[in-house]
Image: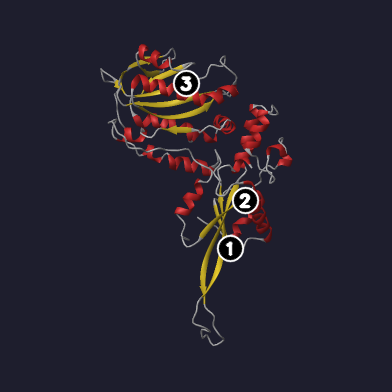
Amino acid sequence: MAFNQELLQTVDVISDSKSSLFGQDFRNEYGSIRWGKVRNQFAWGNIILPDALDLFEEWHKDSEYIVMKGTKDIIQESFNDDGVILDCQDHLYPEHVYRFIKASKRGNDVYQYLVKKRLKPLDDLPDITFFKDNWGVKNTSLLFVTLTYDTKRCDESTAWKNIGKDYHLFYTKLRQEYGGIEYFRTWESTSHFYPHAHVLIAFKEKSFPVFIHKDKDGKRSFRIPQGDKDKIASFWHSNVDVQGVNGTKDAIDELTKYVTKDLCSDKGNKTNAMICLFRRQSYAITRGFVSLVKNSFARVTEENELEDVGTFDLIKDDMCNCNNEFYKWEFIGVLRGVRLRISSDIWVCDLKKPPSSVIEMIIHEQKRWKANHPIGNYSSWCST
């Protein structure tokens, strides 16, 4: 939805570099934190992991807007004082509009909206029941696995740097042992900044016996035989927790909440700060996971990959719903909402005649962006 110029009068109070503990070494020329600079400062030993958390909390609250310039040719006829057309030819005149689209930043409201939309196919899946409590014989082809990281193995930074390749090795060994598998995986940070992984693993050709287990506090869980658990645990270097899943819906909802509901929590901020610092994707879903569940665990080859949300995804959303198809759109750059005087509550704003101060910023940003980026490369904006 587009908004008119009157809505520019409301201004968010966003901390600027003058009131922050982190100076210009962490920012671009507009005062916005850039993760490329943060990573450099971390690599040089100038900040520690709790500083990255503080930087993330400031960064994701600092609304920035992707600036697009739309152009269309309008027909204008010339009339004399008596209302008679002066000539038979229509004249084409260019008309411009500037569109400001709030950028998706991990953890902000746009990101949450886009993630929930991206994961919508999971909500639409059927609820497959593998077993019920009162069944005498229980089996499942879906496991909920948590892979922790032994703190004695390495420091937190090394753990985050290695977690991706360590998980890939785990996944490869699992496939070699059990054949076709699909998974839904998300990272999470502990209170001490160490990573661990939560994974739903769907087995195409394997079903595990399940029994009910009660811990010392009386909490129930579904477990697989110790031999199977030990086999899976042998593919990972640290502690592994394995639970059998009785139904798909609750398990998928449980894992999805790590990506969505926990975004606005202290633990969620810590996780997202580490994901930004070490350039990790918050979640991953293999190509066949949705298809496998949709087809009730029949062997399928359909590809249906769900990817993490990108910075510019709201542009795609907005342009698909745009009523101004006749505009030709040109990317200009990225500007801070606090400087544009746009409230962070506004996601999309159209201006045909921006104030002169905004025009000056637009002209400067267009020149700056073209000087710093290859043509059409928008993906690295947060580093500049």
Secondary structure category for the residue under label 3: strand
Alpha-carbon span between mark 3 and mark 1: 53 Å
Q: Can you name the residue that lies furthest to the bottom here? A: 82
Residue 154 lies, with reference to residue 116, above or below; the image says: above
Secondary structure category for the residue under label 1: loop
Label annotation for residue 370: 2
User: Is residue 247 something that shows in the picture?
Assistant: yes
Foreground label between 2 and 1: 2
Horizontal side of residue 213 vs 308, given as left or right: left
Q: Of callouts 3 and 1, which one flags the residue occurring earlier in the amino acid sequence? A: 3
> Disc 2 residue type?
Lys
Residue found at x 48% / y 43%: 113
Cβ atoms at labels 3 and 1 below 8 Å apart: no
User: Is residue 126 something that shows in the picture?
Assistant: no
Residue 309 location in percent, x, y?
49, 40
> Disc 3 residue type?
Leu
Residue for badge 1 = 352
Label annotation for residue 147: 3
Place residue 289 in its image quadrant.
top left
Viewer-side residue, 102 vs 162: 162
Quadrant in which the C terminus appears: top right
Q: Can you name the residue that lies furthest to the right here? A: 18
Label annotation for residue 63: none
Q: Can you name the residue that lies furthest to the front here? A: 374
Cβ atoms at labels 3 and 2 below 8 Å apart: no
> Disc 1 residue type?
Lys
Viewer-side residue, 200 vs 158: 158
